[in-house]
Image: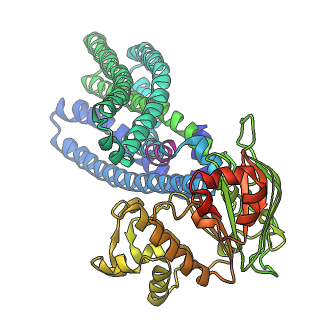
Amino acid sequence: MLIRLLRAYLRPYKKHIALLVLLQFLQTCATLYLPTLNAHIIDNGVVKGDTGYILGYGGLMIGISLAQVVCNIGAVYLGARTASALGRDVRGAVFDRVQSFSAREVGHFGAPSLITRTTNDVQQIQMLALMTFTLMVSAPIMCVGGIVLALGLDVPLSAVLVAVVPVLGVSVTLIVRRLRPLFRSMQKRLDTVNRVLREQITGNRVIRAFVRDPYEEQRFRKANAELTETALGAGNLLALMFPVVMTVVNLSSIAVVWFGAHRIDSGGMQIGDLTAFLAYLMQIVMSVMMATFMFMMVPRAEVCAERIQEVLSTDTSVVPPVAPVTELRRHGHLELRGAGFRYPGAEEPVLKAVDLVARPGEVTAVIGSTGSGKSTLLGLVPRLFDATEGEVLVDGVPVADLDPKLLAKAVGLVPQRPYLFAGTIATNLRYGNPDATDEELWHALEVAQAKEFVERLEGGLDAPVAQGGTNVSGGQRQRLAIARTLVQRPEIYLFDDSFSALDYATDAALRAALAEETAEATVVIVAQRVSTIRDADRIVVLDEGRVVGTGRHHELMADNETYREIVLSQLTEAEAA
């Protein structure tokens, strides 16, 4: 999976990688050539006392060293740029895929896991690529070159290498095999820490209100301890790797000096050759250590690549149309024909055979008990998820066949939990219409009964908004979300219990202003308050995902028991009449 991911996203940088490999090859060759020159200086210059020979070869060594430095700088520069580009591209691909997900796919992965996969997991892949370009490319060249040159110096002494390299390889392999499951567990537990921390930051007020600080501290401590335990397990194995490698290195160096001394004593080898052989041994071992360092990163990067590929290979259930409809004849006619929705693996559907018609100039209300599928019904219209049965049509065209931009322009949704982005009041209001003027923004705020409190804010339209709108109240957040949709000026307005945080006076004033503003548009309101929807042109009653009644308030009060129970739970008989 890791190789497939790297191959796919490094393909555009083939030329950079080819140049990088060439520079690494040149600098490694220069590194390998230096011990041979040093051996010549010792044997032919120092031993014989030839100063000219020493100076000549010394100058050559300086020149080769400078060339090595230049090639190394170029290789590291290209490696860093290519690795950064890889991280950028993979992050962009994951982000684009997540943005295409419907609520179903987001719920399957979970927001904390998607954040970790987009940030930490991609960073692990990027670091592996950087280390590969800067270390791993030169490691095999240095290892093979060192062995060849060591054999050229003294074949009998090279028997030490035959014993050293396999021992190092087996030691590293045994350790790496145990690292992989630990790194997989580490990434999952990192997801858990992310999820717990996110919940605690988001639900800080609830925690304080119920004085659950000790309980939440214990939750985080447990998740943190599990991550720490796994990380320590991986760290202990990593800590074991270097002593093992260095023990083998030191023992091999002792063996080379011991047997090399006997070779020099017998006249089969010169002092300079022994010095060069030791240098090549260290270069071989260094290349193995570099490979070892890479092997430490590979298991975790493989796990991260699998997690990233899992996101990239997941197709959204909301598939864009192949031949999208880009123009509508009518304006704002909404119809659901036998629409139903079932979550994957659920025993019962959330919605069953829902028929609903909403026309321009009318207000259609949807009411029902908690869990009856009201919000799910509204979510089918802007394709937050697609109906698993039946059809949802806008102006006679199935929403699945509409161009996404056209659908987004035609339908405006105010969600049950309004979300504001970090920025200003103006940037949030212009989210659906970037070209809206300040006058249009103030008009939308006035209709949404938000103009007065925005005027009191320092900066007015330029007043800062925190992430999620946490620096304004729930009612203010709802009114700003309504104003944002009004600025968009869609043909179909969907209000998903968007007045629940408003007091009755503000609710009444807002509904009166909306009635005038949306007089020619199609309005669908989901609400819990009977007072909010009793004057609607059509009221649809949902019960356990089915439509059990449709009509006006007085009609449903007379012949629909479900609606009557909902009304009488909020109003007296006289008030309901």
Residue 102 in view (yes/no): no
Residue 547 versus residue 160 in the image, above or below: below
**Could you tell me residue 235's position as x and y percent?**
34, 24
Foreground: 10 or 568? 568
Answer whether residue 292 is visible to the viewer in this image.
Answer: yes
Q: Is residue 136 positioned above or below 485 on the image?
A: above
In the rendering, at what x and y percent does residue 71 appear? Answer: 37, 53
How many numbered marks appear? 0
Residue shown at 41% from the left, 61% from the top: 474
Please provide percent x and percent y for residue 398: 82, 65
In the rendered image, the residue lying farthest to the front is 574
Q: Nearer the viewer, residue 293 or 433?
A: 433
| Residue 498 image-quadrant placement | bottom right
Query: Looking at the image, which residue is at 72% across and 48% down?
Result: 543
Placement of the N terminus among the 4 image quadrants: top right
Q: Residue 216: within the magenta?
A: no
> Residue 251 lies in what quarter of the image?
top left
Query: Residue 511 vs residue 250: left or right?
Result: right
Q: Overall secondary structure of the magenta stretch?
A: helix
Q: How is the image coloured?
A: rainbow
The question of residue 115 being in magenta is answered with: yes
Q: State left or right for residue 302 relative to residue 461.
A: right
Please state the extent of the stretch shown in magenta in the rendering. Answer: 113-120
In this picture, residue 496 sits left or right of residue 287: right
Residue 340 position, x and y percent, is 78, 50
Q: Quadrant of the C terminus?
A: bottom right
Q: Is residue 273 left or right of residue 558?
A: left
Residue located 48% across and 19% down the image: 173
